[in-house]
Amino acid sequence: MARSRTCRPIRMKKGAGFSPENVIPADIPATWAAMEGLYDSGKARAIGVSNFSCKKLEELLAVARVPPAANQVECHPVWQQAKLRDLCASKGIHFSAYSPLGSPGTFKSYSVLEHPVVVSTAEKLGKTPAQVALRWGIQAGHSVLPKSTHEERIRANFDVFDWSIPSDLFAGFSEIEQTRLIRGKFWTHPEGVFKSEEEIWDGGCHGNGITW
Ligand code: A2P
């Protein structure tokens, strides 16, 4: 069966445990060449990447024969990834958001669904904060991949296509202070490939880079 395949920038020693000391440098050109082979053979209908920064994407595009179909990364109103979205759009790479709700319950320090801009927009439109977060992503031009184990939430999360956030409220999202929630601290180690979270992401975990 033809499937899609995704290349991620974290590589572990073969057979070693799931632990930061076991991370080794990823050979992205070689990995991508192998994925292009899967694409050529028809075993993969599409090949893409995940967690690729602008830097990693540009480096990949410089050597890729088949450009990635998609880049799937953390994206929600609190980590809007404007620069990366612009780069993907300019290169014809589909941008897809994981954690589009901010993975509620995972981060004690931050709740996207409780952010005042999200909550007030939801109140004004008679929608839930989750619907507003998802609709923001769709209106920003990318796909959103929310996960729920509850049928009523799955249904509500789909109910985001026949209404929109008016432009004045949408503009308010550009004021939201930006912070990456999924930092990858687990993958850092003083003697490992990634000594800091900054190294994983090729730069800031804060900042805005918001263009609208
Ligand atoms: P649950 O499975 O109990 O519904 P994300 O997709 O951003 O990573 O978020 C996934 C988390 O968000 C899951 O824990 C899920 O919990 C929760 N979730 C999914 N849909 C909603 C919703 N409409 N309102 C609140 N939480 C939601």
Image: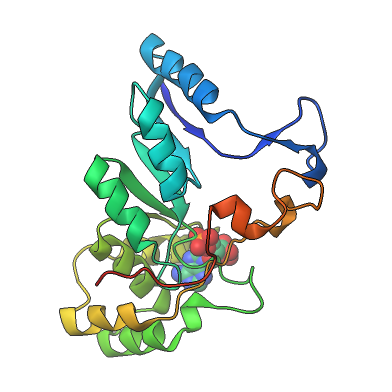
Question: Which picture quadrant has residue 24?
Answer: top right
**Figure coloring:** rainbow
Q: Nearer the viewer, residue 136 or 208?
A: 208
Tell me: 206 left or right of 118.
right
* Quarter of the N terminus within the rendering: top left
Q: Is 150 on the left or on the right of 13, as rendered?
A: left
Where residue 123 appears, as percent x and y from the top left, is: 33, 89
> Is 126 placed left or right of 157 in the picture?
left
Question: Visible in this render: residue 143?
Answer: no
- Residue 89's spot in the image, x, y percent? 25, 48
Closer to the camera, 162 or 151? 162
Give the total of numbered labels. 0
x then y, percent, for residue 148? 52, 59
Vertical comparison of 60 with 204: above or below: above
Quadrant in which the C terminus is drawn:
bottom left
Tell me the residue at 37%/68% (across/down).
209
Q: Can residue 210 be seen in the rendering of this structure?
A: yes
Residue found 22% across the figure and 76% down from its top: 165
Rendered location of residue 60, percent (x, y): 42, 33
Identify which residue is drawn at 50% across, 17% down: 34
Q: Is residue 148 above or below residue 17?
A: below
> Residue at left 49%, top 60%?
99
